[in-house]
Image (tube, rainbow, N blue to C red):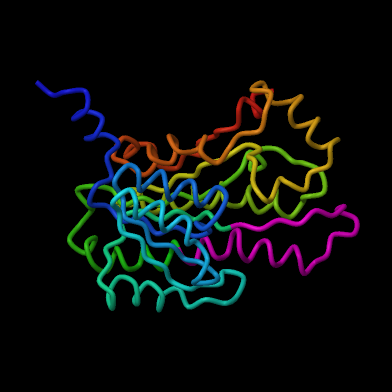
């Protein structure tokens, strides 16, 4: 008879898996990496500065998991094919899970929104998400998938937003980019799920991070008034959702955008 512990491990355990995480040195990305490591995954972090992430690294290593870093500035033009070649072929890592978490924003009225900021946001939030996903998928297709669909699905999890579904004020580029991430998730799922890659998105609501720390009191009051939970979430509130999406428990959930927002989008 299977114990409760064995049953949960069979569904949600990530021992033997390796996750590649962008934006994983702070805020939501750091919490997601730590959650995956807590479930057993080893972590590879793509980060702009190789010295960043020491606190995250020490936390993950204390869990008994491996932690590796690669320098990668997603705001620039990146040869993702070469990067995946370096990680997976030259260095011998087998990636099972990709978390596209890196993202930027800028607040400005739409009438005067700087076009360079618009381009920067779409480059990091959408273009880099697509190109990295494509390069990793090509690697998967050229190796394991060349023998047919995988017995266990590979996972791509994009970090969308509650703003994938609703507009907001003075963040036209960010909201538009997160809407694009949602549709990209569905499109990639349509093409790749049948070949063994499960593509989903996690859409957080308003979470206490550096990105939300600059909100005015008026903006914060509006958010709290609309959120049934009566508070902003913390990055750790996303832990259960990311482990679910990365595990075999979600193998049939491809193409879905999973919202964790304290009830915000229900109003």
Which portion, as a residue range, is magenta?
103-132
- Residue 1 in picture, x, y percent from top left: 9, 20
Q: Nearer the viewer, residue 188 or 9?
A: 9
- Residue 183 in the image: state x and y as whole percent: 56, 48
Residue found 41% across the figure and 75% down from its top: 83
User: Which residue reaches farthest left?
Assistant: 1
- For the image, the number of numbered tags is 0
Picture quadrant of residue 111:
bottom right
- The answer to which image quadrant residue 114 occupies is bottom right
Q: Residue at x 69, y 67 (%)?
A: 120
The image shows residue 64 at horizontal and vertical percentages of: 28, 51
- Going by the image, does 65 lie left or right of 173? left
- Between 160 and 7, the one lying in front of the other is 7
Q: Which residue shows up at 24% across the image and 34% down it?
A: 9
Q: Main secondary structure of the magenta part?
A: helix
Instruction: Report the side of 157 relative to 150 (left or right).
Output: right
The x, y position of residue 214, in whole percent, is: 77, 48
Residue 249 in magenta? no
Q: Residue at x 60, y 75 (%)?
A: 76
Instruction: Decide: is 34 above or below 120.
Output: above
Query: Among all residues in the image, which is located at the extreme right?
Result: 111
Task: Give whichever of 249, 91 is nearer the camera.
Answer: 91
**Quarter containing the C terminus:** top right
């Amino acid at each position: 008879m299977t114990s409760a512990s064995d049953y949960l491990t069979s569904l949600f355990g990530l021992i033997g898996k390796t996750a590649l995480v962008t934006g994983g040195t702070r805020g939501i990305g750091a919490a997601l990496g730590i959650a995956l490591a807590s479930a057993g995954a080893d972590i590879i972090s793509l980060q702009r500065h190789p010295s960043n992430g020491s606190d995250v690294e020490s936390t993950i290593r204390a869990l008994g998991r491996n932690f590796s870093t690669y320098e990668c500035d997603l705001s620039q033009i990146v040869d993702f094919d070469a990067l995946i070649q370096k990680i997976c072929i030259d260095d011998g890592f087998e990636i099972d899970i990709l978390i596209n978490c890196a993202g930027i924003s800028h607040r400005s009225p739409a009438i005067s929104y700087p076009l360079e900021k618009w381009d920067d946001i779409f480059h990091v939030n959408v273009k880099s998400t697509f190109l990295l996903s494509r390069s990793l998928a090509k690697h998967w297709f050229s190796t394991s998938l060349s023998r047919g669909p995988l017995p266990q699905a590979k996972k791509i999890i994009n970090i969308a937003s509650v703003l994938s579904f609703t507009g907001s004020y003075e963040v036209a580029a960010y909201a538009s980019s997160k809407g694009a991430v949602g549709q990209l998730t569905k499109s990639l799922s349509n093409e790749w799920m049948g070949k063994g890659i499960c593509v989903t998105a996690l859409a957080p609501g308003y979470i206490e991070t550096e990105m939300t720390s600059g909100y005015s009191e008026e903006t914060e009051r509006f958010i709290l008034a609309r959120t049934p939970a009566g508070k902003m979430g913390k990055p750790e509130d996303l832990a259960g959702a990311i482990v679910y999406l990365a595990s075999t428990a979600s193998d049939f959930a491809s193409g879905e955008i999973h919202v964790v927002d304290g009830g915000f989008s229900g109003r």
